Image: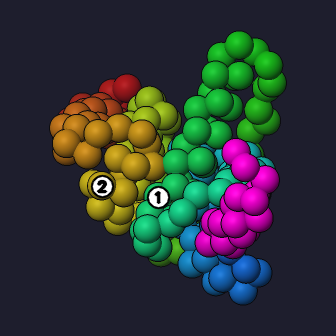
Amino acid sequence: MIFSHAQPLDAVVEDVELTFEMDEDAFRAFYDRTSRPLWNYLARITGESHVADDLLQESYYRFLRTRVGWESESHRRAYLFRIATNLVRDRHRRARLGVFVSLPDPDRDARAAAAGDLAESTLKRTDLRRAMNRLRPRERALLWLAYAQGHAHAEIAQALGVKTASVKLLLFRARRKLAGLLQSTQPRPDGGQSL
């Protein structure tokens, strides 16, 4: 490289860095739109609200550290969910290796039964929670992103790192498995409950 070309390259690098960064107002607006859905996703996938709090912070921290050009708002949101999904995967890997032990959240059931008929609502949520916890993390993530968050298949694929064409089949399998688990928790005609 010739020394006279160094100055124009510096200008290009500065322009590129500016296009990748979000200003504080833009980030606040993005955070306001995405923090609640992301926390709900993390809480559902991990099953623990305090872990969701930690992973939410780490997700935004890593999101801000990236220097990626965003095609659209949905691309930015899918990238954030991808970061969160990878953090959950890393956490599950560490848990399998015994790197840390998570503590149960005793207040979770009390918060979950805040609305409607407490007994019926608690029973349904407990059955669903048990069934969801028996699914693999990727199956939980697929179902949550598709049905609780309302993401399109392309966004789900981007967030989970799978091909868009495979999302439909993966969702079908996850739904079928969840339905089977929910059916196995239904009371039997003799008054017992199968599990």
Residue lying at 40% horizontally and 55% vertically, measured from the top left: 145
Relative height, residue 100 to residue 30 (above, below): above
Residue lying at 50% horizontally and 66% vertically, measured from the top left: 70
Q: Residue 164: horizontal and vertical position, in percent?
A: 26, 46
> Which quadrant of the structure image shows residue 61?
bottom right
Separation (CA) of disc 2 from disc 1? 9 Å
Graded by Cα atoms within 10 Å as few (under 14), some (14 to 19) or many (20 or more), the crowding at tag 2 reads some
The answer to whether 132 appears left or right of 54 in the picture is left
| SS assignment at label 2 | helix
Query: Which comes before the other along the chain, label 2 or label 1?
Result: 1
Q: Amino acid at mark 2?
A: Ala
Q: Residue 116: horizontal and vertical position, in percent?
A: 47, 75
Relative height, residue 128 to residue 72 (above, below): above
Of all residues, the one furthest to the top in this rendering is 97
Q: Residue 37: horizontal and vertical position, in percent?
A: 54, 66
| SS assignment at label 1 | helix
Quadrant the N terminus occupies: top right
Tell me, for residue 154, which label it has, or none: 2
Q: Are marks 2 and 1 in contact (CB under 8 Å)?
A: yes
Quadrant the C terminus occupies: top left
Graded by Cα atoms within 10 Å as few (under 14), some (14 to 19) or many (20 or more), the crowding at tag 1 reads many
